[in-house]
Amino acid sequence: MKKLRVLLIGAAFSADLHSDAYARIRDKVEIVGICDKKLDQVEALANRYGFTGYTAYDNYDDAIAQCDCDLVDICMPNFLHHDVAIKALNAGKNIISEKPLATTVEDAQDIVDTADRLGKHVYYAEDWLFAPAFRKALAIVESGQLGRPLYVRARECHCGSHSPFAQSIKFCGGGCMVHLGVHPVCFMLSRKNNQWTELTAMTSGGGENNMVHQKMEGEDWAGAFIRFADGTYATLEANYVTTGGMEDILDIYCEKGCVHVDLSFSGPVKTYSIDGLDYTVEKAEITTGWSTPAVDEKYNLGYCGEINHFVECAMADKDADVGLRGVDGLETLKVINLIYKSAKEGIHIKNPALEG
């Protein structure tokens, strides 16, 4: 079987998550190029996952123009997603884009429109949709044994990003809602085929109005209440004020029961350490005392299933599932921007696409 040739643009945090997934499907994938302005970071990533035979690039223009690949995987800071995506699409490549699709709705729309015009595919990397625990919860709900779903509460929270790009709205697109809340927003929109009807939101406001991160331009807390066309409701939250490690929480309330998932802290391993461990879970500030070390964290967060799905779709030259397409990344960003509008102006917003 011919392998899919992948060019990785970026060799830092998100590239590591994707590389772990590629390394598990070597029968389907060949990493033919890795690009990062820090070539030592390229080498470190390749050595970590045993990638060989690739070409290293320190400039993404050169990489896109020169690398003989089928798929470009964009693992760059948010503000570069649009530029890299447009150049890769114009070079005739399908792309994977990390979240958010872009920092502005206009740039996200341009990516989707360019792909449509050129007949290429945009795969939007929403790992929540492949987290095994979340998929199990959805399977239970879809079995009908809990009755009709009524209300969903979902959140992603941690103590705050230390990336310099996350501190600026220009570079990130917002605060915690666009950086973390992008997951619960996209997750819910995918479950409802993007058919939301109305929303109301609040945020901490950013800057000196923030609860903790007062040097960050974007908000460090955000919450939204959303109603969907089928009559169900959801509360979606993101914050940078949660200590103790990453929280990925999903609660689904139905007519005859409920299901609760704690993606980050529910695990079979319990450890007590006086001196502390090297690592327990993402964003944990300390590892002393009692802790629950993650077991195969990247797999359980959904990255492996997500990347495998994209590879199989690219090999078959077809779109990804709902929630994982460029248009879904665009709709997610539109909703997040309306969440910001609702919070800033103190207004209730109805979906203009479904009015009338």
Image: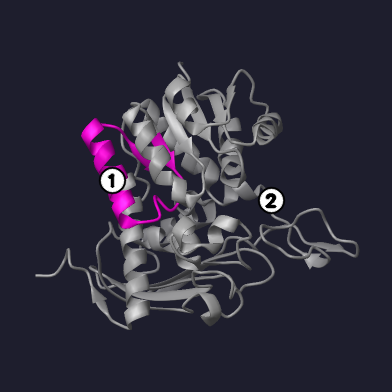
Among numbered discs 2 and 1, the one appearing first in the sequence: 1
Pointer 2 local density, CA inside 10 Å: few below 14, some 14–19, many at least 20: some
State which region is magenta.
95-123
Residue 7's place in the image compared with 356, above or below, is above
Q: Is residue 70 magenta?
A: no
Mark 1 residue element? helix
Q: Residue at x 71, y 29 (%)?
A: 47
The residue identified by callout 1 is 110
Name the residue: 34% across, 33% down.
Answer: 89
Looking at the image, is 329 positioned above or below residue 22?
below
Closer to the camera, 190 or 284? Answer: 284
Residue 227 screen position, x and y as percent: 29, 73
Q: 10 Å neighbourhood of mark 1: few (<14), some, or many (≥20)? A: some
Q: Amino acid at mark 2?
A: Val
Q: How is the image coloured?
A: one colour
Query: In the current view of this chain or complex, which residue is farthest to the right?
Result: 274
Label ID, residue 69: none
**Residue 12 appears in the rendering:** yes
Q: Secondary structure at mark 2?
A: loop
Q: Nearer the viewer, mark 2 or mark 1?
A: 1
Give above or below for 179 relative to 233: above
- Residue 350 versus residue 311 in the image, above or below: below
Residue 244 as seen in the image, left or right of residue 81: right
Could you say which disc has been placed on residue 295 in the image?
Answer: 2
Q: Residue at x 30, y 32 (%)?
A: 120
Q: How many marks?
A: 2
Q: Is residue 126 left or right of residue 270?
A: left
User: Which quadrant: the C terminus?
Assistant: bottom left
| Three-letter code for the amino acid on which mark 1 is drawn | Asp
Q: Is residue 356 left or right of residue 48?
A: left
Q: Is residue 101 magenta?
A: yes
Which of the pair 303/210 is nearer the observer?
Answer: 210
